[in-house]
């Protein structure tokens, strides 16, 4: 057993990002299909660790930094959310929410239907639907406890974690290829060769240089710290109430309030350059730690029927992004980037969605509307809608609490 402490894990995560960049730069397949750098590097390390297990060698990481990095990333999403910009994209946000809601219904219907056909408990189908795929590990952990205690479903927690892990991996792998397929169908107004030079905003093109100063960097770091502190306090106040929300949603909400409140009062204007730098650093390190510490042997231990359901859900996600998301979002370049983002959080999580879109825009050019819409919908609206959808399905006649 090799146990890496906090510093060892941070070094390992940094090396994973460097490995991922080297792989994407040198391997044409990864570059052609827009595979995000943290996904490429993280999966290679996870596969190596899986192989080492056969020689009774195990490596464990200190993942204590993972949650703060995730929360810092969502704080920067909130600090990037300017109401004036969101108002401009209001109609697009509304249409995208419809697409997201439609996928949640399809995922649950597909999961329950396949589970019934394969002779499994329909609850297993629901657990391999939007609960763990669109919901991720956090939502999966919360609902698996309910499924075990209220409905008597055995091994619900293990199934939830394995399904969420499966979704995280596949969400980062299919987004790029889906976008590449769709971009071939349209004239790409955002293509690097055609686009007018423009300074990148928010999470667009993370490798572009951004001019920053030490003092403004510290100011932005302070705003992120306030968002983390106040978000955690807000989460504690809402805990156990009808308005209970995941911690990252509370942190994001505080970031939105800070950004727009300080601006409206004329007290402070958030520097987007610093926010984007800190957000991209947090995102990259979070994904590196999450992916390199994946327990791929949990996926290998999935029973064949569950693996079939999850494989079908992956195909359904890709087809939904191609034939629904892309079309209703306008069948243009922005729609293709949105489809890649939808694959990311439709199967995995919002950080995966951002990484997918960055891999696409880094190659083809910016898509400001995609980076405006996806973070807010994927980080905020989807969790609220998912809870409603899950409860609607649990109200069906064949879900009877024991």
Image (spheres, rainbow, N blue to C red):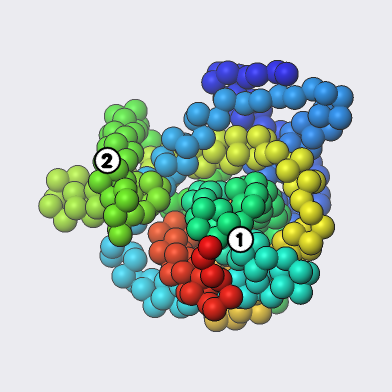
Q: Nearer the viewer, residue 6 or 35?
A: 6
The residue to which callout 1 is attached is 127
Q: Which mark is residue 312?
A: none
Quarter of the image for residue 151 reads bottom right
Vertical relation: 237 (above or below) 388? above
Quarter of the image for residue 182 reads bottom right
Mark 1 Cα shell of 10 Å, populated few (<14), some (14-19), many (≥20): many
Which of the marked residues, 1 or 2, is nearer the chain's N terminus?
1
Q: Nearer the viewer, residue 249 or 76?
A: 249
Vertical relation: 43 (above or below) 243? above
Query: Residue at the location (58% across, 18% down)?
Result: 5
Quarter of the image for residue 346 reads bottom right
Query: Residue at the location (54% across, 38% down)?
Result: 286
Residue 337 drawn at (x, y percent): 58, 65
Is label 1 in a helix, a strand or a loop? Answer: helix
Relative side of 400 to 181, left or right: left
Is residue 339 in view?
yes
Q: Residue furthest front?
A: 402
Relative side of 284 to 40, left or right: left
The residue to which callout 2 is attached is 233
Is label 2 in a helix, a strand or a loop? Answer: helix
Mark 1 vs mark 2: in front: 1
């Amino acid at each position: 057993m090799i146990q890496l402490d906090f510093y060892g894990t941070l070094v390992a995560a940094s090396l994973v990002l460097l490995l991922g960049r080297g792989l994407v730069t040198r391997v044409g397949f990864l570059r052609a299909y827009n595979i995000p750098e943290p996904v490429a590097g993280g999966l290679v390390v996870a596969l190596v660790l899986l192989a080492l297990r056969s020689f009774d060698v195990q490596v464990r990481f200190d993942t204590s930094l993972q949650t703060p990095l995730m929360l810092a990333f969502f704080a920067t999403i909130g600090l990037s959310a300017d109401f004036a910009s969101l108002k401009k994209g209001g109609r697009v946000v509304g249409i995208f929410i419809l697409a997201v809601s439609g996928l949640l219904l399809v995922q649950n219907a597909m999961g329950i239907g396949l589970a019934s056909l394969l002779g499994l408990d329909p609850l297993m189908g629901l657990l391999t639907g939007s609960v763990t795929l669109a919901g991720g590990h956090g939502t999966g952990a919360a609902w698996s406890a309910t499924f075990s205690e209220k409905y008597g479903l055995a091994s619900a927690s293990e199934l939830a974690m394995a399904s969420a892990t499966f979704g995280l991996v596949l969400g980062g792998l299919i987004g790029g290829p889906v976008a590449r397929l769709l971009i071939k169908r349209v004239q790409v107004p955002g293509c690097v060769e055609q686009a007018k030079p423009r300074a990148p905003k928010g999470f667009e093109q993370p490798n572009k240089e951004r001019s920053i100063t030490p003092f403004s960097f510290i100011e932005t770091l302070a705003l992120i710290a306030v968002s983390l502190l106040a978000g955690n306090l807000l989460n504690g106040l809402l805990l156990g109430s009808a308005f209970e929300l995941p911690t990252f949603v509370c942190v994001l909400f505080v970031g939105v309030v800070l950004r727009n409140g300080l601006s409206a009062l004329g007290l402070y204007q958030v520097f987007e350059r610093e926010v984007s730098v800190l957000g991209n650093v947090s995102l990259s390190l979070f994904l590196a730690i999450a992916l390199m510490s994946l327990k791929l042997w949990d996926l290998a231990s999935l029973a064949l029927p569950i693996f079939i359901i999850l494989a079908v859900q992956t195909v359904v996600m890709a087809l939904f992004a191609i034939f629904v998301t892309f079309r209703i979002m306008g069948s243009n370049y922005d729609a293709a980037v949105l489809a890649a983002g939808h694959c990311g959080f439709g199967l995995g999580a919002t950080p995966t969605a951002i990484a997918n879109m960055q891999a696409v825009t880094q190659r083809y050019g910016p898509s400001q509307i995609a980076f405006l819409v996806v973070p807010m919908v994927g980080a905020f609206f989807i969790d609220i809608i998912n809870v409603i959808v899950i409860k609607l399905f649990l109200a069906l006649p064949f879900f009877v609490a024991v």
